Image: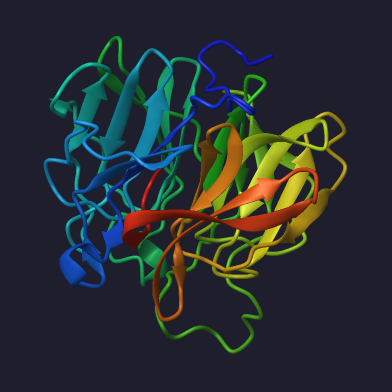
Amino acid sequence: MCAEQEVCPLENDLSTLVVVIGGESTRENRENEHSTSVEILRDSGLCKGSGVPDLPEARGKLCAAYDPSGAIIVCGGGQRFWRPNNNCWQLVKGDMSWNPIPQIYPVHGAATTFYRGKFWVFGGSTGDDSYDHTITDKVQAYNPRTQVWTVEKSLSSPRHKSCAVTIDDEIVLTGGTMLGLGKVKPVWLAEIGIRTAESFDGANWYSLPAMSRAKVEHGCAVATVGGSRGVVVVGGATGDDVVEFLDWEIKQQWKVLGKMNRGRGMMPGVGFIGGKLSIIGGYSWPGAVDIIEQWDEDREEWQRTGMKLKYSRYNQLQ
């Protein structure tokens, strides 16, 4: 069962779809450009003529989540790689335009989830994320009903490019890094990111088993695999073709859930398309990825599908 206000991943429900928002895309053949585009994927493929409007402004490394009451909230991110924005919008079911809501403390590359009726934003960078000093431990939460932002208990350490999900009235935060993602790294740095996984009950942080590979700029989701419900982490800057799964009932160790056909980092999306666990977008040298892979439960492997994004993209949100 899903806790109140938790977004349930509707496995085997053919009506489930994924909304892909913003990011850096190849729209109009312009590589590495922040995008306003919004795409919808369903079991039959890309949904054309959905009527869902593009974002009012281009956004990459944005903060976004689905409000189970029937709305999508988008905040932060930026039109430029080094300068996050404080604007926020909400798209309510049935509306044909994004409407402004109270502004966020500007960050990009933060982890987000919807939890206990609020939109939560964890860490991120307050400026040029090439530099360590821009990485924050700040936690912000927005209540759509009162339209008020609050500052919540800080992270256990400054972090950006981590990933968050809500499961059984707890938040699980995986990976990330407290280092800037500049081109020059210390010679002692064997892998980018951390293996840390933590849970949050609304008041305190608790340690979970460490992942087998460090994760940063990865995707994550709640899913049922082999009859067990838990947390899936996908790709990232380190081990970009590796998928891991933590059984939430026993919480003993992360299990490698096969390798993707196409490794991908820079925040690939994870969601359910037609009830099937799917991986969307991300980056794999030399550019953004448009192919979509799905988990085959019977064969226990990732399979390429015939579906593709209209615009290859990474640093997007689903």
Q: Is residue 158 visible?
A: no
Q: Position of residue 227 (x, y in %)?
A: 82, 31
Q: Residue furthest bottom?
A: 187
Q: Is residue 209 visible?
A: yes
Q: Which of the 4 image quadrants contains residue 149?
A: top left
Q: Position of residue 184 (x, y in %)?
A: 44, 86
Drawn side of residue 187 relative to residue 249, left or right: left
Q: Which is more toward the observer, 265 or 161?
A: 265
- Residue at position x 80%, y 47% in the image: 209
Q: Quadrant of the N terminus?
A: top right
- Residue at position x 29%, y 66% in the image: 128
Q: Position of residue 44 (x, y in %)?
A: 44, 39
Q: Position of residue 105 (x, y in %)?
A: 26, 40
Q: Which is more toward the observer, 310 or 152?
A: 310
Q: How many marks?
A: 0
Drawn side of residue 133 relative to residue 55, left or right: right
Residue 252 versus residue 233 in the image, above or below: above
- Residue at position x 53%, y 47% in the image: 163
> Which colouring convention does the figure follow?
rainbow
- Residue at position x 26%, y 40% in the image: 48
Residue 7 versus residue 265 in the image, above or below: above
Drawn side of residue 192 relative to residue 85, left or right: right
Q: Quadrant of the C terminus?
A: top left
Drawn side of residue 251 relative to residue 86, left or right: right
